[in-house]
Image: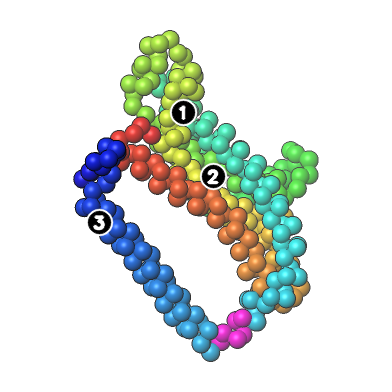
Protein backbone atom coordinates (compact mmCIF):
# COMPACT_ATOMS: atom_id res chain seq x y z
CA UNK A 1 0.00 0.00 0.00
CA UNK A 2 2.93 2.32 0.38
CA UNK A 3 6.31 2.82 -1.16
CA UNK A 4 9.51 4.55 -0.07
CA UNK A 5 11.52 6.72 -2.39
CA UNK A 6 15.04 5.43 -2.97
CA UNK A 7 16.28 9.02 -2.73
CA UNK A 8 14.99 10.42 0.59
CA UNK A 9 13.11 7.52 2.16
CA UNK A 10 9.88 9.56 2.56
CA UNK A 11 6.56 7.70 2.42
CA UNK A 12 4.64 7.91 -0.82
CA UNK A 13 1.46 6.09 -1.84
CA UNK A 14 1.91 3.16 -4.13
CA UNK A 15 0.62 3.01 -7.67
CA UNK A 16 -2.22 0.78 -6.52
CA UNK A 17 -3.27 3.28 -3.86
CA UNK A 18 -3.11 6.14 -6.36
CA UNK A 19 -5.31 4.22 -8.78
CA UNK A 20 -7.82 3.53 -5.99
CA UNK A 21 -7.95 7.21 -5.07
CA UNK A 22 -8.49 8.19 -8.69
CA UNK A 23 -11.27 5.61 -8.99
CA UNK A 24 -12.99 6.98 -5.87
CA UNK A 25 -12.74 10.52 -7.22
CA UNK A 26 -14.29 9.42 -10.51
CA UNK A 27 -17.08 7.64 -8.69
CA UNK A 28 -17.76 10.71 -6.57
CA UNK A 29 -17.97 13.01 -9.58
CA UNK A 30 -20.14 10.49 -11.39
CA UNK A 31 -22.54 10.34 -8.42
CA UNK A 32 -22.73 14.13 -8.22
CA UNK A 33 -23.40 14.38 -11.95
CA UNK A 34 -26.16 11.76 -11.80
CA UNK A 35 -27.74 13.51 -8.80
CA UNK A 36 -27.73 16.90 -10.56
CA UNK A 37 -29.17 15.48 -13.78
CA UNK A 38 -31.90 13.52 -12.01
CA UNK A 39 -32.83 16.58 -9.97
CA UNK A 40 -33.04 18.76 -13.08
CA UNK A 41 -35.19 16.19 -14.87
CA UNK A 42 -37.54 15.86 -11.90
CA UNK A 43 -37.79 19.66 -11.52
CA UNK A 44 -38.45 20.03 -15.24
CA UNK A 45 -41.24 17.44 -15.21
CA UNK A 46 -42.80 19.04 -12.13
CA UNK A 47 -42.64 22.53 -13.67
CA UNK A 48 -44.12 21.21 -16.93
CA UNK A 49 -47.01 19.58 -15.04
CA UNK A 50 -47.76 22.63 -12.88
CA UNK A 51 -47.23 25.38 -15.44
CA UNK A 52 -49.13 23.46 -18.07
CA UNK A 53 -52.21 22.93 -15.90
CA UNK A 54 -55.39 24.72 -17.06
CA UNK A 55 -55.75 26.80 -13.88
CA UNK A 56 -52.11 27.87 -13.45
CA UNK A 57 -52.70 31.41 -14.69
CA UNK A 58 -55.38 32.00 -12.07
CA UNK A 59 -53.32 30.36 -9.33
CA UNK A 60 -50.26 32.46 -10.20
CA UNK A 61 -52.34 35.63 -10.06
CA UNK A 62 -53.95 34.70 -6.74
CA UNK A 63 -51.00 33.20 -4.84
CA UNK A 64 -47.81 34.46 -6.50
CA UNK A 65 -48.36 38.14 -7.33
CA UNK A 66 -44.93 39.88 -7.03
CA UNK A 67 -46.48 43.32 -6.53
CA UNK A 68 -48.65 42.16 -3.65
CA UNK A 69 -45.72 40.24 -2.14
CA UNK A 70 -43.49 43.34 -2.07
CA UNK A 71 -46.28 45.56 -0.75
CA UNK A 72 -47.19 43.18 2.08
CA UNK A 73 -43.63 42.16 3.04
CA UNK A 74 -42.89 45.04 5.48
CA UNK A 75 -45.98 44.46 7.59
CA UNK A 76 -45.52 40.68 7.61
CA UNK A 77 -41.84 41.06 8.54
CA UNK A 78 -42.86 43.35 11.40
CA UNK A 79 -45.24 40.67 12.62
CA UNK A 80 -42.47 38.08 12.36
CA UNK A 81 -40.50 40.07 14.92
CA UNK A 82 -43.30 39.39 17.40
CA UNK A 83 -43.08 35.69 16.58
CA UNK A 84 -39.33 35.80 17.27
CA UNK A 85 -39.89 37.46 20.65
CA UNK A 86 -42.47 34.85 21.59
CA UNK A 87 -40.12 32.10 20.42
CA UNK A 88 -37.24 33.31 22.58
CA UNK A 89 -39.30 33.64 25.78
CA UNK A 90 -41.15 30.39 25.11
CA UNK A 91 -37.89 28.47 24.54
CA UNK A 92 -36.47 29.71 27.85
CA UNK A 93 -39.69 28.91 29.70
CA UNK A 94 -39.99 25.47 28.14
CA UNK A 95 -36.43 24.53 29.12
CA UNK A 96 -36.92 25.60 32.74
CA UNK A 97 -40.32 23.95 33.20
CA UNK A 98 -39.33 20.79 31.31
CA UNK A 99 -36.16 20.21 33.32
CA UNK A 100 -38.14 20.69 36.53
CA UNK A 101 -40.82 18.22 35.43
CA UNK A 102 -38.26 15.65 34.27
CA UNK A 103 -36.40 15.92 37.57
CA UNK A 104 -39.62 15.46 39.55
CA UNK A 105 -40.55 12.38 37.54
CA UNK A 106 -37.19 10.76 38.24
CA UNK A 107 -37.29 11.24 42.02
CA UNK A 108 -37.04 8.01 43.97
CA UNK A 109 -38.85 6.98 47.14
CA UNK A 110 -42.51 6.84 48.20
CA UNK A 111 -42.34 10.25 49.89
CA UNK A 112 -42.00 11.90 46.48
CA UNK A 113 -45.01 10.10 44.99
CA UNK A 114 -47.25 13.23 45.04
CA UNK A 115 -44.64 15.20 43.09
CA UNK A 116 -44.19 12.37 40.59
CA UNK A 117 -47.96 12.09 40.19
CA UNK A 118 -48.36 15.82 39.58
CA UNK A 119 -45.57 15.83 37.00
CA UNK A 120 -46.97 12.75 35.26
CA UNK A 121 -50.48 14.21 35.23
CA UNK A 122 -49.17 17.46 33.79
CA UNK A 123 -47.34 15.75 30.94
CA UNK A 124 -50.29 13.46 30.18
CA UNK A 125 -52.74 16.36 30.14
CA UNK A 126 -50.84 18.80 27.96
CA UNK A 127 -49.58 16.14 25.56
CA UNK A 128 -53.18 15.10 25.00
CA UNK A 129 -54.79 18.52 24.52
CA UNK A 130 -54.18 20.22 21.14
CA UNK A 131 -52.18 23.43 21.28
CA UNK A 132 -54.99 25.37 19.61
CA UNK A 133 -57.43 24.48 22.39
CA UNK A 134 -54.87 25.41 25.06
CA UNK A 135 -54.41 28.77 23.34
CA UNK A 136 -58.15 29.44 23.51
CA UNK A 137 -58.43 28.29 27.13
CA UNK A 138 -55.43 30.29 28.32
CA UNK A 139 -55.95 33.30 26.08
CA UNK A 140 -59.64 33.78 26.79
CA UNK A 141 -60.38 31.76 29.92
CA UNK A 142 -57.62 32.89 32.28
CA UNK A 143 -58.11 36.65 31.64
CA UNK A 144 -61.82 36.19 32.35
CA UNK A 145 -60.95 35.21 35.93
CA UNK A 146 -59.65 38.78 36.43
CA UNK A 147 -56.82 37.58 38.65
CA UNK A 148 -54.28 39.46 36.55
CA UNK A 149 -54.17 42.91 34.96
CA UNK A 150 -54.86 43.20 31.27
CA UNK A 151 -51.98 41.65 29.32
CA UNK A 152 -51.19 41.53 25.60
CA UNK A 153 -52.40 38.52 23.65
CA UNK A 154 -48.81 37.55 22.85
CA UNK A 155 -48.14 37.01 26.58
CA UNK A 156 -51.00 34.55 26.92
CA UNK A 157 -49.92 32.85 23.72
CA UNK A 158 -46.40 32.45 25.09
CA UNK A 159 -47.77 30.91 28.29
CA UNK A 160 -49.89 28.45 26.31
CA UNK A 161 -46.92 27.39 24.18
CA UNK A 162 -44.80 26.89 27.30
CA UNK A 163 -47.52 24.75 28.91
CA UNK A 164 -47.81 22.44 25.91
CA UNK A 165 -44.22 22.15 24.77
CA UNK A 166 -42.79 21.75 28.26
CA UNK A 167 -44.79 18.50 28.53
CA UNK A 168 -43.17 17.12 25.36
CA UNK A 169 -39.68 18.34 26.20
CA UNK A 170 -39.97 17.02 29.76
CA UNK A 171 -40.44 13.51 28.38
CA UNK A 172 -37.40 13.99 26.16
CA UNK A 173 -35.32 15.05 29.17
CA UNK A 174 -36.67 12.15 31.24
CA UNK A 175 -35.66 9.69 28.54
CA UNK A 176 -32.16 11.20 28.54
CA UNK A 177 -31.91 11.05 32.33
CA UNK A 178 -32.99 7.42 32.44
CA UNK A 179 -30.53 6.58 29.65
CA UNK A 180 -27.64 7.52 31.94
CA UNK A 181 -26.35 4.33 33.55
CA UNK A 182 -27.19 4.01 37.29
CA UNK A 183 -23.50 3.46 38.03
CA UNK A 184 -22.94 7.13 37.23
CA UNK A 185 -25.28 8.15 40.06
CA UNK A 186 -23.84 5.62 42.47
CA UNK A 187 -20.30 6.75 41.73
CA UNK A 188 -21.25 10.39 42.26
CA UNK A 189 -23.01 9.64 45.56
CA UNK A 190 -20.04 7.56 46.74
CA UNK A 191 -17.87 10.65 46.23
CA UNK A 192 -20.07 12.59 48.62
CA UNK A 193 -22.26 14.49 46.15
CA UNK A 194 -25.85 15.12 47.13
CA UNK A 195 -28.76 14.13 44.92
CA UNK A 196 -29.08 17.68 43.56
CA UNK A 197 -25.34 17.91 42.90
CA UNK A 198 -25.38 14.51 41.19
CA UNK A 199 -28.19 15.59 38.89
CA UNK A 200 -26.60 18.96 38.10
CA UNK A 201 -22.98 17.88 37.67
CA UNK A 202 -23.18 14.27 36.47
CA UNK A 203 -26.57 13.19 35.15
CA UNK A 204 -28.01 16.23 33.38
CA UNK A 205 -24.89 17.04 31.30
CA UNK A 206 -24.85 13.49 29.93
CA UNK A 207 -28.63 13.41 29.47
CA UNK A 208 -28.69 16.67 27.50
CA UNK A 209 -25.98 15.43 25.15
CA UNK A 210 -27.94 12.25 24.50
CA UNK A 211 -31.19 14.04 23.63
CA UNK A 212 -29.81 17.10 21.84
CA UNK A 213 -31.15 16.09 18.38
CA UNK A 214 -34.64 15.47 19.80
CA UNK A 215 -34.59 18.82 21.61
CA UNK A 216 -33.57 20.63 18.45
CA UNK A 217 -36.41 18.97 16.54
CA UNK A 218 -38.89 20.15 19.17
CA UNK A 219 -37.47 23.65 18.82
CA UNK A 220 -38.02 23.52 15.06
CA UNK A 221 -41.63 22.46 15.64
CA UNK A 222 -42.12 25.28 18.12
CA UNK A 223 -40.80 27.78 15.55
CA UNK A 224 -43.82 26.98 13.39
CA UNK A 225 -46.37 26.81 16.17
CA UNK A 226 -45.62 30.32 17.45
CA UNK A 227 -47.67 31.44 14.45
CA UNK A 228 -50.79 30.09 16.18
CA UNK A 229 -50.82 33.02 18.61
CA UNK A 230 -52.64 34.87 15.84
CA UNK A 231 -55.88 33.17 16.94
CA UNK A 232 -55.76 35.32 20.09
CA UNK A 233 -55.60 38.53 18.07
CA UNK A 234 -51.84 39.12 18.26
CA UNK A 235 -50.65 40.84 15.09
CA UNK A 236 -47.86 38.44 14.25
CA UNK A 237 -46.75 37.35 10.78
CA UNK A 238 -49.81 35.14 10.25
CA UNK A 239 -52.32 37.78 11.36
CA UNK A 240 -50.48 40.44 9.34
CA UNK A 241 -50.73 38.16 6.30
CA UNK A 242 -54.45 37.74 6.97
CA UNK A 243 -54.90 41.51 7.12
CA UNK A 244 -52.95 42.03 3.91
CA UNK A 245 -54.91 39.25 2.20
CA UNK A 246 -58.17 40.99 3.05
CA UNK A 247 -56.74 44.31 1.88
CA UNK A 248 -55.54 43.11 -1.54
CA UNK A 249 -58.10 40.33 -2.06
CA UNK A 250 -55.13 38.09 -2.80
CA UNK A 251 -53.57 35.09 -1.03
CA UNK A 252 -49.97 36.03 -1.83
CA UNK A 253 -49.34 37.42 1.70
CA UNK A 254 -49.90 33.94 3.13
CA UNK A 255 -47.23 32.59 0.78
CA UNK A 256 -44.88 35.37 1.92
CA UNK A 257 -45.52 34.53 5.58
CA UNK A 258 -44.90 30.84 4.88
CA UNK A 259 -41.59 31.56 3.16
CA UNK A 260 -40.48 33.73 6.08
CA UNK A 261 -41.21 30.91 8.52
CA UNK A 262 -39.25 28.52 6.30
CA UNK A 263 -36.28 30.92 6.29
CA UNK A 264 -36.58 31.14 10.07
CA UNK A 265 -36.56 27.37 10.55
CA UNK A 266 -34.06 26.38 7.85
CA UNK A 267 -30.83 27.19 9.78
CA UNK A 268 -32.01 25.17 12.79
CA UNK A 269 -33.10 22.29 10.55
CA UNK A 270 -29.66 22.13 8.92
CA UNK A 271 -27.95 22.45 12.33
CA UNK A 272 -30.10 19.60 13.66
CA UNK A 273 -29.11 17.37 10.75
CA UNK A 274 -25.43 18.22 11.26
CA UNK A 275 -25.53 17.51 15.00
CA UNK A 276 -27.40 14.23 14.43
CA UNK A 277 -24.90 13.07 11.80
CA UNK A 278 -21.96 14.09 13.99
CA UNK A 279 -23.28 12.16 16.98
CA UNK A 280 -23.95 9.13 14.79
CA UNK A 281 -20.37 9.17 13.50
CA UNK A 282 -18.99 9.43 17.02
CA UNK A 283 -21.11 6.50 18.17
CA UNK A 284 -20.03 4.38 15.21
CA UNK A 285 -16.34 4.86 16.00
CA UNK A 286 -16.93 4.05 19.67
CA UNK A 287 -16.53 7.54 21.13
CA UNK A 288 -18.38 8.61 24.25
CA UNK A 289 -21.32 10.86 23.37
Furthest residue in direction front, as rendered: 7
x and y percentages locating residue 269 in the rendered image: 50, 52
> Which residue in the structure is indicated by mark 1?
204
State which tag comes first along the sequence, 3 or 2.
3
Q: Is residue 59 magenta?
A: yes
Q: Quadrant of residue 264?
A: bottom right
Q: Quadrant of residue 94?
A: top right
Q: Nearer the viewer, mark 2 or mark 1?
A: 1
CB under 8 Å between callouts 3 and 2? no
Q: Which mark is residue 19?
A: 3
State the residue in front, 249 or 119.
249
Q: Nearer the viewer, mark 3 or mark 2?
A: 3
Is residue 104 positioned above or below 268 on the image? Answer: above
For disc 1, the neighbor class at 10 Å (few under 14, some 14 to 19, many from 20) is some
x and y percentages locating residue 119 in the rendered image: 49, 33
Residue sitting at x 65%, y 67%:
256
Is residue 32 positioned above or below 211 on the image? Answer: below
Which SS class for mark 3? helix
Q: Which residues are magenta?
A: 55-60
> Magenta residues: mostly which secondary structure?
helix
Amino acid sequence: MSAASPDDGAWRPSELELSRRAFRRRQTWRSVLVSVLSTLVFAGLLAWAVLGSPGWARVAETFFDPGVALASLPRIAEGLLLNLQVLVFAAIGVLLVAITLATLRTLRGPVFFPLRAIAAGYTDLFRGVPLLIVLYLVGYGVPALEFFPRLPAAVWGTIAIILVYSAYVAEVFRAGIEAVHPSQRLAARSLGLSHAQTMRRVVLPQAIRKVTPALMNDFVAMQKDVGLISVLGAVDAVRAAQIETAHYFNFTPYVVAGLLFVLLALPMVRLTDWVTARMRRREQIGSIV
